Image (cartoon, rainbow, N blue to C red):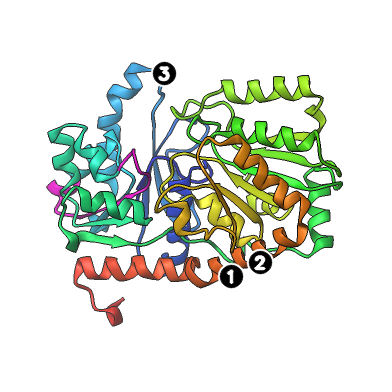
């Protein structure tokens, strides 16, 4: 398994990778190969009983970036004899090296498409012939949403290589709590128990649009009783290229000006994100670009009333507007504000849509089922009969 970040570091692709590894580790021999900019993390590690090999890459150091190729190659050499498949979770510059190493050592290659506009085939075709040639060496491509399937078809790659497998969610970890348990979670997280709690989870990036959620929430918060709290979970400062550290600062300044500073809570990172979902009433995903957002699946599995930007064949493949959540147009603050007011003014609507959201996750996105689909493809790639594993 190759991913840009892995536990205890947090990323969408890394968390999905870990979830599949944990579900299948008793029947599949996994090794995780990943990068990190955190010098405190060990180069050789074991997580959940699985070997993790990390390559330290300092984005600010040209020498670190230049020598990463050699260090990545050595990390691959340490484990290549044990494995038959190289499964890339996303495709970036380091993936080109991994493809070559896999070809030289005659390994099968699988690529998981994680985000439209980032590693889908149409985007990759625009990044040069060599990168695209390496990309197309994969035996199998996994698309997590219908949108990524459509982009795969648009690139005219062989249909036989594509498998549509959505991200999965741990239905035991992410589940609704009774009202008294939710109040206890709020106390533990120092979240005010009065009024509703509106939640955002994700990087503070321009694509995620946390600043637009703040604007819409602030308009509602200043004109609605009882008071509500906005909880924003995610990295506000990071060397990761998507994080824009100006966003959180702007939100804090505006909150101070509007007199809302005591009703907004930032949580930079947590390994118990399920407790935050279980403390909230409403979840909002205002993103304009996604593959299939884990956070939306987790929030829905937790029984939250969810509002998401309508992203064609991504969020609207999960949320049916008005049945198990609400969809709003991208970058439409008045529409987002109106959706928040609907839940604030009608708690019964919020409860009903949250219940239906949970039912959707149980029916279609349970992690056990999703992990089983990956296992079936691994067996297919190797020609291994089901009874032989």
Residue drawn 16% across the image and 52% down it: 157
Residue most toward the bottom? 387
- What is the secondary structure assignment of the residue under circle 1? helix
Q: Is 108 in the magenta?
A: yes
Label 3 packing within 10 angstroms: few (<14), some (14-19), many (20+): few
Neighbor class of circle 1 (other Cα within 10 Å; few <14, some 14-19, many 20+) is: some
Residue 85 position within the rendered picture, expressed as x and y whole percent measured from the top left: 25, 57
Locate residue 185 relative to residue 163 in the image: left or right: right
Quarter holding residue 265 = top right
Q: Is residue 291 left or right of residue 160?
A: right
Position above or below: 101 against 241: below
Magenta segment range? 101-119
The number of callouts visible is 3
In the rendered image, the quadrant that contains the C terminus is: bottom left
**61 in relation to 376, above or below:** above
In the image, 30: left or right of 377? Answer: right
**What residue is pinned by disc 2?**
355
Using the numbered discs, state the Cα–Cα distance from disc 2 to disc 1 in whole angstroms: 6 Å
Residue 64 picture location, percent across and down: 35, 22
Q: Which residue is mark 1?
A: 359
Q: Which mark is residue 60?
A: 3
Q: Is residue 62 above or below residue 7?
A: above
Instruction: Give the mark, 1 or 3, whose residue is nearer the N terminus.
Output: 3
- Between disc 3 and disc 2, the foreground one is 2
User: Going 20% across and 60% down the picture, which residue do you hit?
Assistant: 161
Cα–Cα gap, marks 1 and 3: 46 Å
Q: Return the x and y of residue 178 as percentages of the image width and height.
A: 78, 65
């Amino acid at each position: 398994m190759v991913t840009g970040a892995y536990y205890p570091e947090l990323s969408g692709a890394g968390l999905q990778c870990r979830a599949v590894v944990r579900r299948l580790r008793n029947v599949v021999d996994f090794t995780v190969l990943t990068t990190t900019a955190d010098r405190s993390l060990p180069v050789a590690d074991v997580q959940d009983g699985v070997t993790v090999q990390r390559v330290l890459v300092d984005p600010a150091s040209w020498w670190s970036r230049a020598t990463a190729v050699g260090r990545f190659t050595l990390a691959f050499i340490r484990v290549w004899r044990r494995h038959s498949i190289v499964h890339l979770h996303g495709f970036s510059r380091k993936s080109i090296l991994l493809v070559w190493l896999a070809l030289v050592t005659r390994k099968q290659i699988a690529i998981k498409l994680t985000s439209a506009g980032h590693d889908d085939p149409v985007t990759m075709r625009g990044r040069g012939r060599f990168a695209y040639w390496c990309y197309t060496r994969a035996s199998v491509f996994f698309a997590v949403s219908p949108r990524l399937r459509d982009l795969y078809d648009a690139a005219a790659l062989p249909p036989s290589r594509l498998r549509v497998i959505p991200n999965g969610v741990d239905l035991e970890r992410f589940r609704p709590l009774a009202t008294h348990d939710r109040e206890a979670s709020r106390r533990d997280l120092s979240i005010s128990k009065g009024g509703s709690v509106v939640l955002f989870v994700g990087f503070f990036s321009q694509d995620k649009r946390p600043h637009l959620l703040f604007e819409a929430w602030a308009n509602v918060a200043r004109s609605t009783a009882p008071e509500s709290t906005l909880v924003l979970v995610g990295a506000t400062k990071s060397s990761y290229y998507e994080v824009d550290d100006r966003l959180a600062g702007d939100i804090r300044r505006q909150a101070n000006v509007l007199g809302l500073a005591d009703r907004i809570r930032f949580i930079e990172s947590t390994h118990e994100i399920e407790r935050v979902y279980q403390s909230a009433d409403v979840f909002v995903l205002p993103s304009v670009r996604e593959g299939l957002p884990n956070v939306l699946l987790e929030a829905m599995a937790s029984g939250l009333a969810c509002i998401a930007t309508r992203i064609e064949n991504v969020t609207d493949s999960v949320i049916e507007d008005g049945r198990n959540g609400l969809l709003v147009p991208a970058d439409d603050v008045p529409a987002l504000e109106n959706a928040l007011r609907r839940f604030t003014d009608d708690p019964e609507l919020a409860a009903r849509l949250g219940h239906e959201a949970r039912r959707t996750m149980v029916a279609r996105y349970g992690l056990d089922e999703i992990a089983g689909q990956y296992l079936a493809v691994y067996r297919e790639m190797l020609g291994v009969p089901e009874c032989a594993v």
